[in-house]
Amino acid sequence: MSCLQDKLKQAYLAGELAEAVAGLGLEDLVFDASQYLVEDVIASANSANSETLIVLTHGAGANMQHEFMTAMAKGIAASGARVVRFNFPYMRANAIDGKRRPPDRAPKLIADYALQLSILKLQFKPKKIYLVGKSMGGRMSTILAESLKVDGVVCLGYPFIPLSGGEPRLEPIENCLAPIMVIQGERDKFGHKGLVETWPIMKKAQLHWLTDGDHGFKPRKSSGTSLEANLAEAISFIRNFINK
């Protein structure tokens, strides 16, 4: 971890992340194009979304280049918004040496996320910003939106229940200061429809269910639908969300 990231981590732990981010200088916010995947605006410059930035973050086990991430990025970008992906630190390390690592702890992830968002804001100067995250990335997006102002958060397969068991991770949703949408497969092992809909706090979020989908939105063959159909529906939900 760099000194800057450690500074942001300590600021987050102290509840002072917004102030630390506001104090970053231009020398801290250097855009290295090799560290990002950018889906440029497809629509005309007159599109309502031409100055909208979507930051799309990966889940715990797959990096920004995973086929799910690529499909979502291209589909969302078709609305005219710019979609940017980056890898969290443990995935950046994996890209260098090929060694598989567990995800970093939340404070380190949040510190890096805050830095990446600050770099992207300076680079692209968007009028609107939405954080869209797969699983772990969605949870980190809701947590970041407690401290930094964004226009909305979208969680793709929110990891409500840890696989090891325990209490549901509802606090980030409860504390999120931005409008929030959760898109979930009906059979998601981290939070299925029959369970999630029993929690009153979920009335705070726009909650959409994908037919027979698992954590990656894939349905069973017997369902009568397909992964492609579920992905297309998820993309449609997101595009409607950012167009409001």
Image (spheres, rainbow, N blue to C red):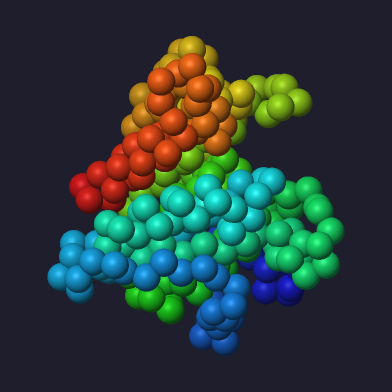
**Residue 64 at x, y percent in the picture:** 58, 58
Instruction: Evaluate whether residue 118 shows in this view.
Output: no
Seen at 29% across and 48% down, the residue is 239
Viewer-closest of 25 and 16? 25
Residue lying farthest bottom? 27
Q: Residue lying farthest left?
A: 46
**Residue 115, horizontal then vertical, whole percent:** 57, 68
Residue beneath the point at 61% across and 46% down: 59
Residue 78 drawn at (x, y percent): 30, 58
Does 92 appear above or below 176?
below
In the image, what residue occupies the spot 20% across and 73% down? Answer: 45
235 lies left or right of 7: left
Q: Nearer the viewer, residue 169 or 214?
A: 214
Q: Please indicate whether residue 157 sits to the left or right of residue 179 in the image.
A: right
Residue depicted at 55% across the width and 70% down the height: 36
Picture coordinates of residue 63, whole percent (x, y): 64, 55
Q: Is residue 58 left or right of residue 39?
A: right
Q: Is residue 82 visible?
A: yes
Name the quadrant of the N terminus: bottom right
The front one of 61 and 13 is: 61
**Label total for image:** 0
- Examine the rendered structure and indicate whether residue 64 appears above or below residue 241: below
